[in-house]
Image (tube, grey):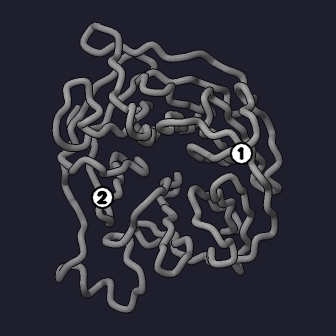
Amino acid sequence: MTFSVYRILVSGIALAAPLLGQEWNALAAARGWARQDVTGAVTFYDPGSQSLRTWSKDGSSEGVLSMTQLGALPNFWCLDIRDQAWVVTGNQLFYVDKTGKAQKKEALITEVSDLAWDRTGFYLVYRSEGIYIEKRDEKKGDVLWTYGSKPKKGSIAQGPQQFKIAVSPSGQLLCTLGSDLNVLMVDANTGKEQGKSFLAYNNAAAPALQVFGSDRQPIRWWSQKGVLLANVPGSQMPQKTAGQFLAKLDLSQGSVEFMATGLDEGSTLIGVQDGEATFVKPNGGLAFLALK
């Protein structure tokens, strides 16, 4: 399996005509945390307007939701079917309506390390010494189940944020295990553990990543191939090398494969759809890679 970089979209003369009249251009301005939805839509935080901006490559999704009333910088978010948002800021969870007003505010036990969602709810994994995951209802934010040992309220794990999560279409929640390339598998409907992967690389145990001084990078499910993709900077590879890589974690075969993307290190995987991976570039803007 190989990657071909078939298009990297940047601002410039070639894009000027179709972008006339737009105040914000995701292709050039998108930055920070985001997660692509199954519909292809992505919601970014725009610090200039202090708002969440929804965008899709085909133009089918767009919208702006003000965050000015929160009084804090959004860290993670997801929109519901009414285009209202659950937003995490530090150790606070807000439900923001279409006017930008916070209809609900809840103090969380500690800071969040990652957020994911599917049609049945959304998931929070916390920045703690051990794995602790909550599944919450999309309508009221109620906790539906928890997994792991609940950390002490207000405690924050020292060092990198090691836990990143993704959800497969079959209803399996996957969570990274520190610097290990293996993942924890949890039933997304019940919160019951389904086991841990044991991946091999070149007929040996999968190597650990060098993440002692930096956070783990995102993981995203590639539905077309039924595999998990892990974003891996070249400097974290067992044999350090330049650029950004993807690790293809084939859980059914118990194997891992490292694949170069041709992108600069710091490019962040935010989604995979229809054989195409979407990245946020280190200095802002989007890059699209064909997966083969």
| Secondary structure under the numbered disc 2 in the rendered image | loop
Which residue occupies the foreground of this view, 83 or 198? 198
The residue tagged 1 is: 120
Q: Mark 2: which amino acid?
A: Lys
Q: Is residue 70 above or below residue 209?
A: below
Quadrant where the N terminus is found in the figure: top left
Q: Is residue 5 left or right of residue 164?
A: left
Residue 243 image position (x, y, % from top left): 20, 43
Which residue occupies the foreground of this view, 69 or 15? 69
Residue 33 image position (x, y, % from top left): 47, 56
Quadrant where the C terminus is found in the figure: top left
Q: Is residue 139 left or right of residue 216?
A: right
Q: Is residue 94 above or below residue 123?
A: below
Q: Who comes first in sequence, dot 2 or dot 1?
A: 1
The residue tagged 2 is: 281
Instruction: Give the residue at x 59% y 15%.
Output: 195
Residue 13 is at least partly visible in this image: yes
Which residue occupies the foreground of this view, 158 or 29? 158
| Secondary structure under the numbered disc 1 in the rendered image | loop
Instruction: Give the residue at x 64% y 59%.
Output: 89
Q: Is residue 246 left or right of residue 108?
A: left
Q: Mark 1: which amino acid?
A: Thr
